[in-house]
Each structure stands twice: as structure tokens, then as C-alpha cells.
Amino acid sequence: MESAHQQVHRDHAAEVQRGARRAQRVQRATAEMRQHIREALGPFDTGDPRWYGWLQENLLRYGSERDSPRLMQDFLGRPVSPQALLNQIHRLAPPAK
């Protein structure tokens, strides 16, 4: 039989895992959004006054009428994938010697 302490520990570990999975989804979605904006408007890092209007028209106008997965799929034209995040990580890696 599981003790109360073991139950709390197991529940905490499960919550930590859920939090890590949520964080990974947010990181993938953020990387995908940056890549999509870069493809549509040019480099994301330089700042561009067109971004807000473009995002308002292509993403923000839906407010909360769509759930996040549907909103991102409509915005990207496909489901979110880890590739954009992997590309971002690769760009940050130090050059090979």
C-alpha cells in the first residue's frame, strides 16, 4: 500500500512532467511562429512596424474563438512540428572547429 508521502511524491513528479511537456509545446509553437513571420515578412530579429498589423490580421483577430491547436494550424497552414525549434537551436550552436 502506498503511503501518503509516496502519493505526494508521485503526484508532484507527474505535475513536473506535465509542466515540462507544456513548456516544450510553447517553445515549439513560438519557434514556429517566428519562422512563419520570418518567411512572410523577413528577418524577425530586426524589428518591423508591419508585424503588429500582419499578426493582427493573420493571428490575433480570432481572439479566443478558436482553440490553440486550430489557431496555430490555420496560421501555419499545417500542424506545429518541432523542426523550427530544432532549426533555432542549431543556429545558436557554436560553429564547428
Image (cartoon, rainbow, N blue to C red):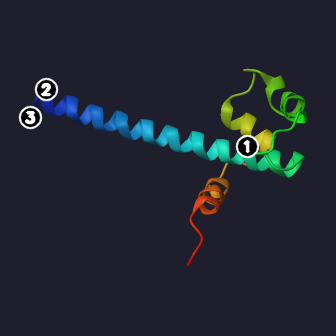
Q: Amino acid at mark 1?
A: Met
Q: Residue at x 70, y 47 (%)?
A: 32
The answer to whether 50 is drawn above or below residue 90 in the figure is above
Residue type at mark 2?
Ala
Residue 83 visible here: yes
The mark that comes first in sequence, 1 or 3, is 3
Q: If the image is split into quadrants, where does the C terminus sit?
A: bottom right
At mark 3, the secondary structure is loop
Look at the image and tell me in which quarter the N terminus lies: top left
Q: Is residue 32 above or below residue 87?
A: above
**Disc ID at residue 1:** 3
For marks 1 and 2, the one nearer the N-term is 2
Instruction: From the top left corner, tell me how far across and down residue 63 is, in percent.
Output: 76, 21
Q: Residue at x 65, y 43 (%)?
A: 29
Q: Is 85 on the left-hand or right-hand side of 39?
A: left
Residue at the disc numbered 1: 33
The residue carrying pointer 3 sits among few (fewer than 14), some (14 to 19) or many (20 or more) residues within 10 Å by Cα, namely few
